[in-house]
Image (tube, rainbow, N blue to C red):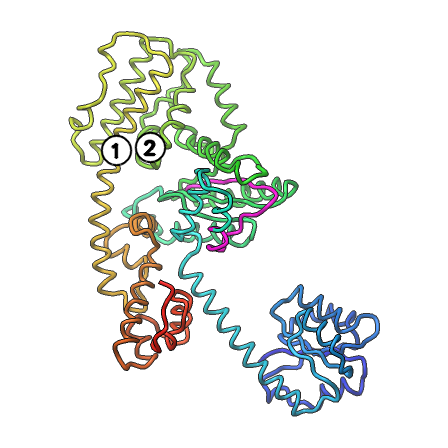
C-alpha cells in the first residue's frame, strides 16, 4: 500500500475526498490530513507519505510553498496540486517546484482515480528501479572498482591536467570539487592463519564491511583501493569542517578496528588539509611517508606529522649504548618486505629506519652491524618465500670491500638496494604464484559464470586463497573487478543468444546466470547502453 496525505483548507472538500474515495481499492492508505501547509509540514515529517495531495490556495502557507519545501526535503515524494485556478502561471510554477500533476477542481472520483492509478504504476516502477540500482551497486562494490583506483592513482601522481581530472571524475561519478581536502590511508591485514584454533573466518570480513559502511555513509568521503590491503579516503568539505571530519574519521576507524585487534593488524595515516586539487600529489606523498612508519612503530596505529616528528626528535638524542633493541628487530624489515607494497615505498621506509640511529651512524662498528643486519634479514626473507639466496646476493655490492666510513647517503643507498632487490624477488615469486592462481580461477569462472550463485568468495575458496587477496590480485591483473568480469561474460553470452536464437527473455535470463528477467534487463541496459529488446532488433551497444 502506498501512503497518501491530504492538505485542503475547505473542510467539506477535505472530508469528501477523505471519506468518499476508495483509497484501499486503488492501492493507497490514507494516513493523514491538514487544513494548511504550515500544519501539514510536521505531520508529513512524521508519516512520510508516498503521495501528497494539496490545494494551491490556503492560509498561512499555500500549496506552492509547501510543495517547494517538501520537494527539497523529500525529492521522491510525489505531489499532486488540487486547484480551482485554471491559470498557466500557477501550473508553470507548480512544475518548477517539482509537482507531479496539476488537477483542476471540481475533483471527480473518476479523474482522481485515473491519476492515482497512473501514479501508483510510476512509483512502483521507480521503487523497483531503485532496488535494482542498490543491488547492482552492492554487487559491484564501488569502492573497489578498478577504474576508480586508476583515477585516484592519476590524481595523486600530479601529471594529469585539471581539465582531464574533472572530465574523468564526472564520467565515473566521483565527486572531487570542494573548498578543502584531506587524505587518509588505512591498512587492514589478517593477523592469523585459518589453521588457528580460535579463528573466525567471517570476523575479518565483518570488520572490513563495517569500516566501509562508515565511509560510504557520508558523501564527503571518496573511498578507493591502493593495493592488496591498503585503501585510501579522500575527504571533501570546507576548511572549517575538515577538522571535525578528520577527528570523526580517526575516532570511528579506531573504534571499529580496536575491538578485533586479536585477529587484525590495522593502521591509519592522515595528512593536513589542502585547498587545491593540485596540492593533492604532495599531500599524498607526505601521508604515504607517515604511513610507512607502521613497520617501525608497531604500537602506534594512528600516524601523522606530529607523531613522526616527535619520534625523530626522541631518536636523535639517543646515545650508542641506549639504542632500543626493538629498533633492530628483524621483523621490522621482514614485515615491510612481505607487506610493504611496491618499490616506491622503500625510500620512505629506509629514511624512517635510519632516523633512529642518526647519533651513532658515524661509528664504523655500528655501520657494519647495521648493513649486515639488513643483509641477513633480507636473505632470510628471500629464503622464506622459497627462493635461492645465492641468486639474491649475486649482484649485490660488497660493502666490506671498500673498508671506509660511509656517509648517510651511501648507507641509505646500500640498504635501499638490498631491500629493492628483495622486493624484486618477492614480486617475481608473487607474480608466478598469482598467474597460477588466476589461471585456475579463470577456468573455474568460465565454467560456472552462468550459475546465479557464483561469487568472489566461492572462487577464492576454490583456488585456496583469501577473498581479499583474490579480489586485489584479480583487479590488478585483469584491469577490472571480479564482478565486472563476470557481468561482461554474462552480457557477451546474452548478446549472442539474443542475436542467434529465438529464446525468450526469461530463458536467456536463466541461461546467463540471473533469476529475475527485469533485473537482467536493468543490468543489460546499465552496461550496454540499450535494452535487450533494442539489441535484438539490431541496436548497437556502447562497446
- Nearest to the observer: residue 90 or residue 66: 90
- Nearest to the observer: residue 415 or residue 457: 415
Q: In the image, residue 75 lies at what x, y percent?
A: 62, 67
Q: In the image, residue 481 lies at what x, y percent?
A: 35, 55
Q: Residue at x 25, y 9 (%)?
A: 402
Q: Quadrant of the C terminus?
A: bottom left
For disc 2, the neighbor class at 10 Å (few under 14, some 14 to 19, many from 20) is some
Q: Secondary structure at mark 1?
A: helix
Q: Residue at x 73, y 85 (%)?
A: 104
User: Position of 357 compared to 485: left or right?
Assistant: right
For the image, the number of numbered tags is 2
Q: Quadrant of the N terminus?
A: bottom right
Q: Is the residue 31 above or below the residue 488 in the image?
A: below
Q: Is the residue 183 above or below the residue 408 in the image?
A: below
Q: Secondary structure at mark 2?
A: helix
- Nearest to the observer: residue 184 or residue 203: 184
Q: Earlier in the sequence, mark 1 or mark 2?
A: 2
Query: Residue at label 1?
Result: 424
| Labelled pair 1, 2 in contact (Cβ < 8 Å) | yes
- Nearest to the observer: residue 197 or residue 312: 312
Query: Residue at label 2?
Result: 343
Q: Is the residue 134 above or below the residue 156 in the image?
A: below
Q: In the image, residue 85 lies at what x, y percent?
A: 78, 82
Amino acid at each position: 500500500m502506498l501512503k497518501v496525505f491530504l492538505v485542503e483548507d475547505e473542510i467539506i472538500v477535505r472530508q469528501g475526498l477523505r471519506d468518499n474515495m476508495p483509497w484501499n481499492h486503488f492501492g493507497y492508505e490514507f494516513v493523514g490530513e491538514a487544513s494548511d501547509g504550515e500544519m501539514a509540514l510536521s505531520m508529513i515529517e512524521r508519516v512520510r507519505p508516498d503521495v501528497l495531495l494539496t490545494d494551491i490556495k490556503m492560509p498561512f502557507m499555500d500549496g506552492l510553498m509547501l510543495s517547494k519545501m517538501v520537494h527539497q526535503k523529500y525529492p521522491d515524494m510525489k505531489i499532486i496540486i488540487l486547484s480551482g485556478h485554471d491559470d498557466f502561471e500557477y501550473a508553470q510554477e507548480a512544475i518548477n517546484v517539482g509537482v507531479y500533476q496539476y488537477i483542476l477542481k471540481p475533483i471527480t472520483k473518476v479523474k482522481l482515480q485515473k491519476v492515482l492509478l497512473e501514479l501508483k504504476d510510476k512509483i512502483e516502477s521507480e521503487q523497483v528501479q531503485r532496488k535494482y540500482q542498490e543491488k547492482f551497486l552492492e554487487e559491484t562494490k564501488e569502492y573497489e572498482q578498478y577504474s576508480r583506483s586508476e583515477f585516484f592513482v592519476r590524481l595523486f601522481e600530479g601529471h594529469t591536467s585539471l581539465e582531464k581530472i574533472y572530465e574523468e571524475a564526472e564520467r565515473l561519478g566521483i565527486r572531487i570539487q570542494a573548498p578543502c581536502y584531506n587524505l587518509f590511508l588505512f591498512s587492514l591485514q589478517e593477523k592469523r592463519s585459518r589453521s588457528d584454533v580460535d579463528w573466525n573466518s567471517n570476523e575479518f570480513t565483518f570488520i572490513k564491511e563495517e569500516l566501509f559502511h562508515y565511509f560510504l555513509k557520508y558523501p564527503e568521503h571518496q573511498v578507493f583501493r591502493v593495493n592488496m590491503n591498503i585503501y585510501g579516503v579522500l575527504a571533501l568539505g570546507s576548511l572549517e569542517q575538515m577538522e571535525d571530519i578528520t577527528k570523526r574519521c580517526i575516532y570511528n576507524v579506531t573504534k571499529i578496528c580496536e575491538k578485533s585487534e586479536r585477529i587484525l593488524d590495522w593502521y591509519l595515516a592522515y595528512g593536513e588539509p589542502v585547498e587545491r586539487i593540485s596540492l593533492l600529489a604532495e599531500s599524498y606523498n607526505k601521508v604515504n611517508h607517515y604511513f610507512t612508519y607502521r613497520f617501525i612503530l608497531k604500537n602506534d596505529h594512528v600516524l601523522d606529522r606530529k607523531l613522526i616528528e616527535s619520534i625523530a626528535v626522541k631518536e636523535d638524542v639517543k646515545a650508542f649504548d641506549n639504542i632500543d633493541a626493538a629498533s633492530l628487530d628483524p621483523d621490522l624489515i621482514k614485515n615491510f618486505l612481505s607487506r610493504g607494497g611496491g618499490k616506491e615505498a622503500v625510500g620512505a621506509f629506509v629514511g624512517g629506519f635510519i632516523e633512529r640511529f642518526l647519533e651513532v651512524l658515524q661509528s664504523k662498528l655500528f655501520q657494519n652491524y647495521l648493513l649486515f643486519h639488513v643483509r641477513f634479514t633480507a636473505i632470510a626473507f628471500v629464503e622464506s618465500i622459497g627462493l635461492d639466496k645465492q641468486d639474491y646476493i649475486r649482484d649485490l655490492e660488497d660493502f666490506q670491500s671498500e673498508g671506509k666510513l660511509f656517509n648517510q647517503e651511501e648507507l641509505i643507498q646500500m640498504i635501499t638496494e638490498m631491500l629493492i632487490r628483495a622486493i624484486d624477488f618477492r614480486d617475481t615469486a608473487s607474480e608466478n604464484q598469482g598467474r597460477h592462481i588466476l589461471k585456475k580461477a579463470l577456468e573455474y569462472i568460465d565454467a560456472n559464470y552462468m550459475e546465479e550463485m557464483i561469487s568472489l568468495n566461492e572462487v577464492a575458496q576454490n583456488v585456496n586463497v583469501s577473498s581479499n587477496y583474490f579480489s586485489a590480485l584479480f583487479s590488478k591483473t585483469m584491469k577490472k573487478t571480479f564482478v565486472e568480469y563476470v557481468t561482461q561474460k554474462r552480457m557477451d553470452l546474452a548478446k549472442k543468444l539474443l542475436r542467434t536464437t529465438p529464446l525468450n527473455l526469461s530463458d536467456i535470463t536463466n541461461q546467463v546466470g540471473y533469476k529475475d528477467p527485469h533485473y537482467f534487463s536493468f543490468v543489460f541496459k546499465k552496461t550496454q547502453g540499450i535494452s535487450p529488446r533494442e539489441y535484438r532488433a539490431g541496436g548497437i551497444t556502447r562497446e
